[in-house]
Image (tube, rainbow, N blue to C red):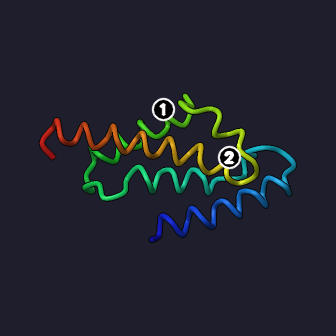
Amino acid sequence: MVLAGCTALGVWVAGEAERLCGSKDATPIVIDEIVGVLLTYYAVPVALLPVLVGFVCFRLFDILKPLPQLEQLPGGWGIMLDDLCAGLLAQGCLRLLLVLLGY
């Protein structure tokens, strides 16, 4: 519920911040990163390896933008869905690695 609530709030906040800053996904807008990281670590064991791997995977997918068309969506949707996609992909990679390592 926290993730869903933060996502809904983030869409609104990011859209307003974009309007106030006058640019798409401006540097001061970080709620999208926070929600993306929350999704990355959702229901993952708390230990050093998952934290490090999750962070690296999230940053990698956030930089590579596997679905760049998400950024083109209007307002806060484009800002938020871009990082939610990165978080979802990072979560998948992290879970796969944890299964392979027997976590």
Relative to 92, does residue 6 appear above or below in the rendering? below
Where does residue 100 sit, x and y in percent of width and height?
17, 35
In the rendered image, the residue lying farthest to the left is 102
Left or right of residue 38, residue 12 in this image: right
Residue drawn where x is 46% and y is 40% of the image: 58
What amino acid type is highlighted by mark number 1? Leu
All told, the count of numbered labels is 2
> Alpha-carbon distance for marks 1 and 2?
18 Å
- In the displayed structure image, the side of residue 23 where residue 12 appears, left or right: left
Horizontal relation, residue 85 to residue 45: left or right: right
Given the image, on which type of amino acid does mark 2 rest? Gly
Dot 2 crowding, Cα within 10 Å, few <14, some 14–19, many 20+ = many
Which one is earlier in the sequence, the residue at label 1 or at label 2? 1
Q: Residue at x 41, y 36 (%)?
A: 57
Quadrant of the rendered image containing residue 5: bottom right
Residue drawn at 63 percent across, 67 percent down? 9
Q: Which residue is mark 1?
A: 60
* Residue 70 screen position, x and y as percent: 63, 40
Q: Residues within 10 Å of mark 1 (few under 14, many from 20)?
A: some
Kindly identify which residue carries mark 2. 78
